[in-house]
């Protein structure tokens, strides 16, 4: 059996397959039937902790879950680790619903967190080549953006899109390709507090999974 923290709806750790492989199976570690495969030139590599997915060509490397529309709760947390490997950056992880959805753009001079047409932009940009943790929380009225467990901005958000399919490595419009690594994508059905997010970043909340 798998023991996991409450409200963790989807969790992708990129531990599957042979390191360096492509076309590998990507498991949802919550046990939900939303698994997929690495596509195009993206590969599973050694990452921050265990494996990660690497996007190298800046063109069409991606992992996408087009067959599985995930439900976005009325309050949620969308979080992941990423490491930008070029100066331009790009869209690391998105949740796509037509032209809407959730998107995190990690650029060279700013970081932009978006849900539909609402965005939070910050000049806080982790150093190229370093891992950093990114998160968006939403409590039903306010969207908050975090980098490494620290709030970097808020915005009012009403009637956002409530579902989407997950894509890593490119933006909602299939553009703005990301070059770098992504790991540990999580979607919670609650807005984690800043203290809880800090625990995720420090590893004190690590999915709480183990085999019994």
Image (tube, grey):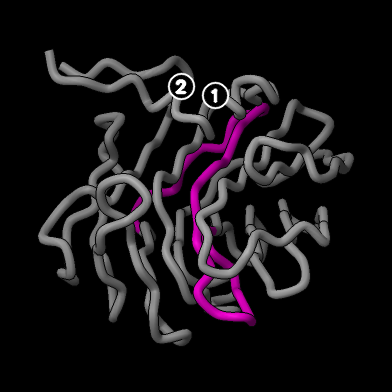
Residue 78 horizontal/vertical position (percent): 57, 40
Q: Which stretch is magenta?
A: 67-93
Give the mark nearer the N terminus: 2 vs 1.
1
Report the quarter where the N terminus lies: top left
Residue bearing the label numbered 1:
199
Q: Does residue 75 belong to the magenta stretch?
A: yes
Image coordinates of residue 199 in percent, x first then y, are: 54, 24
Q: Residue at x 43, y 58 (%)?
A: 182
* Mark 2 Cα-neighbour bin, 10 Å: few <14, some 14–19, many ≥20: few
The outermost residue toward the right is: 156
Quarter of the figure with residue 123: bottom right
Residue on which disc 2 sits: 204
- Is label 2 in a helix, a strand or a loop? loop
> Residue shown at 77%/72% (left/top)?
109
**What is the spatial separation of the Cα atoms under label 2 and label 1, in whole angstroms?**
5 Å
Q: Position of residue 204 (x, y in %)?
A: 46, 21
> Nearest the camera: 192 or 166?
192
Tell me, yes or no, whether the two marked residues, 2 and 1, touch with CB atoms within 8 Å.
yes
């Amino acid at each position: 059996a798998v023991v996991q923290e409450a409200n963790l709806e989807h969790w992708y750790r990129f531990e599957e397959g042979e390191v360096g492989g492509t076309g590998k199976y990507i498991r949802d570690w919550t046990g939900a039937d939303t698994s997929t495969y690495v596509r195009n030139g993206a590969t599973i590599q050694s990452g921050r902790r265990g494996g990660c997915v690497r996007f190298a060509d800046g063109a069409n490397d991606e992992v996408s879950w087009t067959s599985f529309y995930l439900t976005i709760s009325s309050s949620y947390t969308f979080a992941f680790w990423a490491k930008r490997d070029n100066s331009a950056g790009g869209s690391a992880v998105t949740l796509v619903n037509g032209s809407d959805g959730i998107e995190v753009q990690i650029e060279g001079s700013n970081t932009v967190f978006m849900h539909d047409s609402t965005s939070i932009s910050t000049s806080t940009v982790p150093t190229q080549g370093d891992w950093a943790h990114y998160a968006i929380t939403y409590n039903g009225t306010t969207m908050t953006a975090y980098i490494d467990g620290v709030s970097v901005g808020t915005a009012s958000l009403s009637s956002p899109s409530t579902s989407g399919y997950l894509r890593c490595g490119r933006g909602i419009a299939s553009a703005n390709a990301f070059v770098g690594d992504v790991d540990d994508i999580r979607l919670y059905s609650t807005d984690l507090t800043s203290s809880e997010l800090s625990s995720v970043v420090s590893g004190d909340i690590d999915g709480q999974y183990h085999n019994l």
